[in-house]
Image (cartoon, helix red, strand yellow):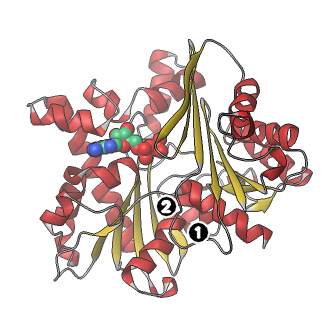
């Protein structure tokens, strides 16, 4: 079975191809092919690879998502060597869709009704859902009636209890869809399944706090394989401090800035999404590697950025522990979670009171998916490599079987 996975971001387009025979393996197989297009003001960077080899790399000066993506996908059957005999050799296409609105808690085969629902949820994710829809339509044009599956980043959190999902504003917000949706659900769900496997336990019996720490950061409290609380909310701006996003702030700051600086919605959006977080505080970078390196050279603003990041992470992990009534494991995943021993060490040091103890040697050199706990630790600490593409591919297999 050949499964193509598309991740259509606001200013990027990623695609990858898996080829599997029989039932999907438990562990992610390597990509057969992958591609990434990143748009900037001056054009787009295109990179296509297969295995460790680069097949194509170029900066193109202009081109819409449709134009460039069609060319990039054509590499599969027109490139040298061709990797598949033709477009009809693709069996199914999976899409990461950021917002499933109130409708979707599980992946869905794409139909006109599903496309309408994704379009309706665009009002909540105006940068992301239209890109996802465009991805679906590009595939319709190139691959005709190939089955397509939409997998939603909000789906895993769709059934968090009402008290966790509802903002304490006016009750009518609920009927307008203003509620906590949560994001990164594809990876939080994958981490829950993978953690159960790594711990040799039934997922149903586990309580987990998963920390997705990448450019965007969020936590999930997971009981028995179901999300019961999460830190992102109505939008992916809520919760933890992130690379360029503020995370939760007093909403009074927004009205203050509107009054004092006469900022409009777009200016506030830019301020909180693009000029805040690690980048806003440090004035150096949104990248945790650069923050840690600057703080080690004595940069005070980098230190402040790191300290706020850890403070907020610790306080929200604490709240997830409380919601769950304790946890069996704390899971770190995504760019920072998988790679920053400093972030894991500084965070875990706060949780010795719940019996969590890191093995510092394992923490400084974890294997791809590993248990970093000291033998006596009552709460395990795991690192799990984020596998969103593979999760989407597996959902495709399940939907078609
Ligand atoms: P996205 O959320 O866009 O999928 P990633 O999960 O790849 O992003 O995370 C990207 C972030 O991971 C980078 O911005 C950087 O802050 C962080 N990161 C990557 N490698 C390291 C590292 N070795 N040490 C610390 N942080 C890292």
Q: What residue is drawn where x is 26% and y is 38%?
A: 289
The residue sitting at the front extreme is: 81
Crowding at label 2, few (<14), some or many (≥20) Cα neighbours within 10 Å?
many
Split into quadrants, the picture shows ligand 1 in the one at: top left
Crowding at label 1, few (<14), some or many (≥20) Cα neighbours within 10 Å?
many
Give the image location of residue 360, x and y in percent.
13, 64
Cβ–Cβ under 8 Å for marks 1 and 2: yes
Which one is in front, 44 or 89?
Answer: 89
Residue wearing tag 2:
230
Residue 48 visible in rendering? yes
Asked if residue 47 is positioned above or below residue 361 in the image, the reply reads above
Q: What residue is drawn where x is 75% and y is 46%?
A: 121
216 with respect to 66 (left or right): left
Give the image location of residue 230, x and y in percent.
49, 61
Give the image location of residue 176, x and y in percent.
74, 50
267 with respect to 331 (left or right): right
Which one is in front, 246 or 113?
Answer: 113
Q: What residue is drawn where x is 52% and y is 86%?
A: 204
Residue 105 visible in rendering? no
Residue wearing tag 1:
160
């Amino acid at each position: 079975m050949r499964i193509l996975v598309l991740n259509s971001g606001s200013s990027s387009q990623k695609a990858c191809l898996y080829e599997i025979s029989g039932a999907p393996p438990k562990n992610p197989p390597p990509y057969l092919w992958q591609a990434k297009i990143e748009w900037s003001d001056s054009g787009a960077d295109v990179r296509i690879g297969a295995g460790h080899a680069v097949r194509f790399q170029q900066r193109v000066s202009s081109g819409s998502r449709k134009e460039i993506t069609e060319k990039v996908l054509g590499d599969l059957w027109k490139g040298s060597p061709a990797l598949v005999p033709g477009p009809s050799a693709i069996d199914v296409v999976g899409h990461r869709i950021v917002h499933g609105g109130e409708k979707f808690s599980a992946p869905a085969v794409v139909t006109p009704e599903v496309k309408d629902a994704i379009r309706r949820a665009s009002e909540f994710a105006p940068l992301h859902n239209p890109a996802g829809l465009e991805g679906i339509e590009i595939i319709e044009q190139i691959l005709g009636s190939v089955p397509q599956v939409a997998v939603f980043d909000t789906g895993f959190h769709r059934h968090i209890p009402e008290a966790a999902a509802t903002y304490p504003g006016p009750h009518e917000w609920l009927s307008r869809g203003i509620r906590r949706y949560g994001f990164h659900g594809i990876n939080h769900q994958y981490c829950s399944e993978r953690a159960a496997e790594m711990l040799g336990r039934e997922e149903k019996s586990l309580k987990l706090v998963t920390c997705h720490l990448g450019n965007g950061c969020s936590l999930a409290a997971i009981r028995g394989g179901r999300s019961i609380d999460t830190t992102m909310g109505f939008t992916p701006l809520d919760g933890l401090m992130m690379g360029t996003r503020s995370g939760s702030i007093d909403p009074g700051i927004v009205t203050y800035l509107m009054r004092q600086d006469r900022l409009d919605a777009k200016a506030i959006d830019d301020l909180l999404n693009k000029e805040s977080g690690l980048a806003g505080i440090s004035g150096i970078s949104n990248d945790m590697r650069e923050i840690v390196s600057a703080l080690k050279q004595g940069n005070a603003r980098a230190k402040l950025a790191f300290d706020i990041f850890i403070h907020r992470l610790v306080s929200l992990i604490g709240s997830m522990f409380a919601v769950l009534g304790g946890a069996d494991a704390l899971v770190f995943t995504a760019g920072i979670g998988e790679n920053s021993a400093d972030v894991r060490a500084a965070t875990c040091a706060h949780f010795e009171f719940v019996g969590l103890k890191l093995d510092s040697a394992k923490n400084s050199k974890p294997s791809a998916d590993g248990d970093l706990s000291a033998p006596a630790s009552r709460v395990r600490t795991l690192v799990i490599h984020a596998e969103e593409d593979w999760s989407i591919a597996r959902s495709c297999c399940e939907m078609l079987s």
